[in-house]
Image (tube, rainbow, N blue to C red):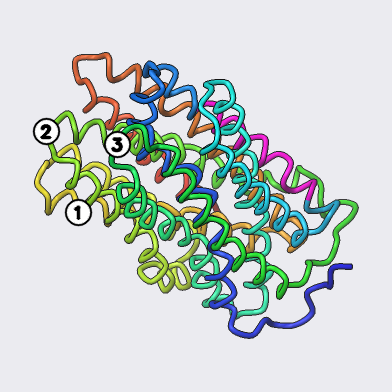
Amino acid sequence: MEKTVSAAIRHPIGVAIALSMAPATALGYARFAYSLLLPDMRIALHWSYLQAGTMNTVNAAGYLVGALIASPLSRRFGLGRTFRLAALMMVITLAATAAVSGYYDLLVLRSLSGLFGSTLFVVGSGIAQSVALGVPSFRAPAVLGSYFAGAGVGTAISGIAIPSVVWSASLWPAGWLVLAGISGASLLLASAASRRVGEPARGDGPSVRGSHYFKLLPTFIAYGLFGLGYMTFLTYQVAYMRHAGLSESRVVLVYVAMGVSVTAGVFVWHRPLGRLRPHLAAALVYSTAAVGSAIFLISSGLAAEVLGSFLFGICLMTTSTVVSLFSRRLLPATMQTGAMGVATIFIGAGQAIGPILGGVASTSAWGLRGAVGVGVAGIVASAAIGSLQRG
């Protein structure tokens, strides 16, 4: 039987860093890395761009389903057991992706990777919230930020690992196999850390009613708009850079730089998030991301691209920290996992809609520049809405 949280955890930052291998896998390896393997898979498997894009659509659909079931599963089986089961299924799914080549088989596996990845991410955030319960409020952003920063670690590692093993289109399965191996090792560490964290007290009655989540509606909407913006930006950023004639090595450099900056975000933001009023912190984070993404529309120089990647990257997962901080401030501990689940539904919907809007914009006179512009506009809108949250 899972124990209940009763005391502060020793070395909470260390535990959060170990748990951060969950977002490293769920986002860095299972979601973002697909953009690195997509060109080779499209060539080797003779896909159209529509077929290639559909893989992202079903992944987003699976992500939404995972967000819906994460909270009920964790209430039924406990955070720890649900986390470890999702981790196991995540590794199996990534390994299976390397073993098949049928289009519909891959559609199923991409949807499952979204489902298990979302469950892993949401439940992991609930465990990270339990870790943060035992620390002073000014240190909570560092603990939560350390967890979410794992997505940057996964992004940077995949950006280095995949080009190292996939040097021709036919080798795309090796990329997924490497991702499965790295994920397995990463999630062993995360699963061990999850055993050190007790379960929050079970809630009942009005404490778990969905109406309580309306307190966070501006935060949820801002998070969804950010999902629309950042996924559109990331979807078309590489194509935009390649269309401008940039070399593959330069594209990879910018990709890795973004991953490193995501991890650096915890060091950049933990003091401001701990001292500023939450709505001001949210507006600052979202606005900084908007500036970083907009730089790509203003300049094509390497220095500007690295700067834009840095500003965008340090905010990419910090927005999840902002959601967690508002949730921590406005809701009881029993609703933390549910709140992140609701937030993930909003961001998942935005991620599914954004690339479609970007695709429509790309057919206009603005071309790919218009698609990237849709992403920037979504992030700007998230800053405006996020500043309305009070609490």
Q: How far apart are the alpha carbons under marks 1 and 3?
A: 27 Å
Residue 40: x %, y % from top left: 34, 32
Three-letter code, disc 3: Ser
Can you see residue 215? no
Left or right placement of residue 128 versus residue 4 in this view: left
Towards the viewer: 171 or 312? 171
The mark lying in front, picked from 2 and 1, is: 2
Q: Residue at x 24, y 14 (%)?
A: 364
> Could you tell me what secondary structure mostly forms the magenta stretch?
helix
Q: Quadrant of residue 266?
A: bottom left
Image spot of residue 82 (x, y percent): 75, 54
Q: Which residue is mark 2?
A: 245
Image coords of residue 179 (percent x, y) = 47, 50
Quadrant assignment, res 167: top left
At horizontal 67% and vertical 81% (from top left) the residue drawn is 9
Magenta-highlighted residues: 57-73
User: What kind of residue is marked 2?
Assistant: Gly
- Quick one: SS at disc 2? loop
Q: Are marks 2 and 1 in contact (CB under 8 Å)?
A: no
Q: How far is the residue under mark 2 from the one under mark 3?
A: 20 Å
Q: State the mark number for residue 168.
A: 3
Q: Is residue 104 magenta?
A: no
- Can residue 153 be seen by looking at this rendering? yes
Which residue of the protein is positioned furthest toward the left in this rendering?
A: 301
Judge by depth and name the residue closer to the eye, 285 or 121.
121
The numbered disc on residue 306 is 1
Q: Nearer the viewer, mark 1 or mark 3?
A: 3
Task: Name which of mark 1 and mark 3 comes first in the sequence.
Answer: 3
Q: Give whichever of 323, 314 is nearer the camera.
A: 314
Q: Amino acid at mark 1?
A: Val
